[in-house]
Image: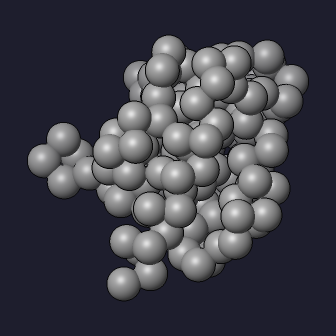
């Protein structure tokens, strides 16, 4: 039987009728048509599906939607706009940190959650925050530069 779940997604109150154990990723993509979070492994191990729930980076493929009841959910679509990018998005573009683009939304969301808490995060803290986000393209050095650049911008 479906449950009514209310979320605040990218600043808008949304109500969906789903099973409470449905992964948040499926609700975002299928019910709310927000496709920024990607399905990667389905086990919460690759980070492609990362979103921010009440300030914390979570793997939406293994996060039951019932746990998001009444919480603020931010997806990549809610960070910035084409006209006004979020500092992390801008830094990833400026540093050319994306190659194939599949993992990058999760990287941006993990970095954003960290920098919102601590814009002056150390290199070690950045590496730890991104450790659960897998990338096979080899842009790791550019990703680290982008996060450092965004942190400087956000700390001002």
Give 155 or 16, whichever is nearer the viewer: 155
| Residue 30 placement, left or right of 57 | left
Above or below: residue 26 compared with residue 129: above
| Residue 147 placement, left or right of 39 | left
Which residue is outermost to the front? 141
Above or below: residue 115 compared with residue 66: below
* Coordinates of residue 6 in the picture (x, y in percent): 55, 49
Taking the image as drawn, is residue 113 in sight?
Answer: yes
* Coordinates of residue 147 in the picture (x, y in percent): 53, 56
Which residue is outermost to the bottom? 156
- The structure residue drawn at horizontal position 64% and vertical position 24%, both measured from the top left corner, is 138
Taking the image as drawn, is residue 24 in sight?
Answer: no
Give 150 or 65, whichever is nearer the viewer: 150
Count of labels shown?
Answer: 0
- The structure residue drawn at horizontal position 34% and vertical position 40%, both measured from the top left corner, is 93
Give 142 or 106, whichever is nearer the viewer: 142
Q: How is the image coloured?
A: one colour
* Coordinates of residue 118 in the picture (x, y in percent): 62, 77
Quarter of the figure with residue 19? top right
Q: Quadrant of the C terminus?
A: bottom left
- The structure residue drawn at horizontal position 78% and vertical position 64%, both measured from the top left corner, is 124
* Coordinates of residue 150 in the picture (x, y in percent): 44, 62
- The structure residue drawn at horizontal position 42% and vertical position 54%, both measured from the top left corner, is 88
Q: Quadrant of the N terminus?
A: top right
Quarter of the figure with residue 11? bottom left
């Amino acid at each position: 039987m479906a449950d009514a779940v209310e979320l605040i997604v990218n600043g808008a109150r949304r109500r969906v009728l789903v099973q409470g154990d449905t992964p948040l990723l499926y609700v975002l993509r299928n019910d709310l048509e927000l496709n920024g979070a990607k399905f990667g492994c389905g086990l919460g191990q690759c980070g492609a599906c990362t979103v921010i729930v009440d300030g914390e980076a979570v793997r939406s493929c293994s996060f039951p939607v019932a746990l998001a009841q009444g919480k603020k959910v931010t997806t990549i679509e809610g960070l910035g706009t084409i006209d006004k990018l979020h500092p992390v998005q801008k830094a990833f573009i400026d540093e050319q940190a994306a190659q194939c683009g599949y993992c990058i939304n999760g990287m941006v969301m993990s970095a954003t959650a960290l920098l919102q808490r601590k814009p002056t995060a150390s290199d070690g803290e950045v590496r730890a925050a991104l450790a659960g986000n897998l990338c096979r393209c080899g842009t790791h050095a550019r990703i680290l530069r982008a996060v450092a650049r965004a942190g400087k911008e956000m700390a001002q």
